[in-house]
Image (spheres, grey):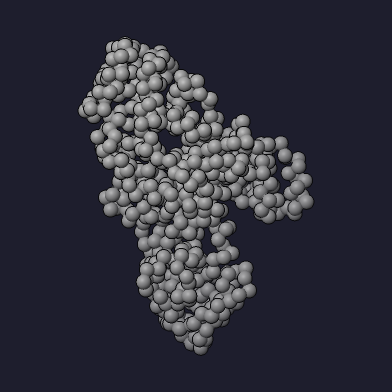
Amino acid sequence: MRNFEKEIRAHALKNALEHGKAQVERILPKLFQHGLQKKDIPEIIPDIKEIVKEVNSLDKNKQQKALNLLAGYIPEKQEQPSGLPELPNPSKKMVLRLAPFPSGALHIGNAKTFTLNAIYAEKYNGKLILVMDDTIGSEKKPLMKESYKLIEDAFKFLKINHEKKIIYKSNRLKIYYNYAEKLIEKEKAYVCYCSQEELRKNREGGIECGCRQLPKKIQIERWKEMFRAKQGHAVLRIKTNMMHPDPAFRDRVLFKISDRPHPKTKKRYRVWPTLEMSWAIDDHLLGITHIIRGNDLAIETQMEKYLWDIFHWKHPETIHTGLVNLEGADKISKSKAQEEVKSGKFAGWSDPRTWSIQSLEKRGILPEAIRQFVREIGLNKQDITLPIESLYSINRRMIDSASNRFSFIADPIKITIKDRPQIKTIQVPVHPEKKETRTVRVGEISVSKSDFTKLKGKEVRLLHLYNVKLDKQAKLTSTENKNIPKINWVSHSVPATILMPDGKTVKGIAEEGIKTLKNSEVLQFERFGFVKLNKKGSEYNFWFAHR
């Protein structure tokens, strides 16, 4: 692995000057633009931590002087006001698009591309069009009726301001048919009856099939017959060079037959365009100037350009970005989530295991945190892996000061304290950085089973209260020793349940102060983590956000 010391130091200094303190999770994503590879992450983290500690020990003047010496180690594009590089060939009337496929709720993975499009539309004061990419899809990834609203709600939560009029591809089939016929007229497309095995052999050998050789008149008749043919009997293919270096590019499918009902158009249409066919037409007709999409759609982009050239249309600027894998999150897949939601394994699309935007909202992840997370990733060209803690760290900074502290313990065990002071109430800070306090009643005390098991017989500090030698019959101690374990405790409790990101629940008791909370309020259970209240009737249910 190459040495990234100067790049780390430069970004740490810049981070410290901008935010008052350098942080590891803000610096790691920046290194991918310098060539850092996924496999190098474990090895480089200790170096980042060491340099961050050193940088934070300097005063601002020394930090600025040091950064001036290392300015060349931060790419110029990082100096853009938005924190993102300029798009190629920006114009006065820029038009970008959102292209969700409604097979489920948006998740944190695919929200990255949509958020990037929104941020750039805002940056250039451009137009952002929402196009529901609801062509028929595949049997493995079918459309879902509820997805349309889930997607719209996710965009509202993320504060993605698109044009009011939503465009549905399922309403544009006749437009696609019209251009299919133009391609046939130009002798650039043909109807193919060949089997998948025949096609595979022809592609491998660079051989044109017999269907391709038929005259235009017969191709038009075959096209009309497609609308009455059985599913799988025929497809419309584009004519390309059968010696193209990439066999997958040779005579790709533009239209196929499907008898599966569509959630919006039911069985009105049976002949459906592929992604590249529909987008080649729509990107032109909708006046799209810039397309930001994933690297996984590279061949589709290549085919779109091929079709644009046939019609002599101007090419929009296409920018590909790499995927972002999140360590600490289960493999995120909309198809897998759809299966689990349908089977009942997941409790709907808000289940935290879907990693949907709805589930993140339930957990207390702010839209501003997701946006900042996306900004810091930027237009990564290669696939990268980042710890989910990177998102959590951003969110933590945004919610910390507004989140009051309360006590919660799991699996409570009651203890009796011998000769304890007759203290009826104590004043506890609502937040470490606030002068405000709240009154907590002191009565029969419970501690968590895990703390009791681990620390039984040892001196501990009951947080904000006093020191005891922990046991079922605990003994008050008068030592001034501050270097002892601190544990949570609860008196006058309320039953509480916390839903964790893995779908499991933690049951316990919280202090009665939670009765003052408003529903959907975010708070921190001390020494446990940030949670969001999801109260149902008299039940106090919380969703875990992060530590």
- The answer to whether 229 is drawn above or below residue 126 in the figure is above
Given residues 46 and 478, the one toward you in this image is 46
**468 above or below 238?**
below
Q: Residue at x 33, y 54 (%)?
A: 348
Residue 198 appears anywhere in the view: yes
Name the quadrant of the N terminus.
top right
Residue 104 image offset from top left, x and y in percent: 36, 46
Evaluate whether residue 34 shows in this view.
Answer: no
Q: Residue 436: horizontal and vertical position, in percent?
A: 60, 75
Q: Is residue 540 above or below residue 206?
A: below
Q: Which residue is drawn at 40% across and 40% down?
A: 168
Residue 89 x/y as whole percent? 61, 31
Question: Could you tell whether 158 is left or right of 144 in the image?
Answer: right
Closer to us: 293 or 314: 314
- For the residue pair 300 and 480, the one nearer the viewer reads as 300
Q: What residue is at 55 percent from the left and 77 percent from the top? A: 438
Residue occupying the point 54% across, 34% down: 290
Q: Is residue 341 left or right of residue 16?
A: left
List x then y, in percent, for residue 271: 30, 30
**How many tags in the picture?**
0
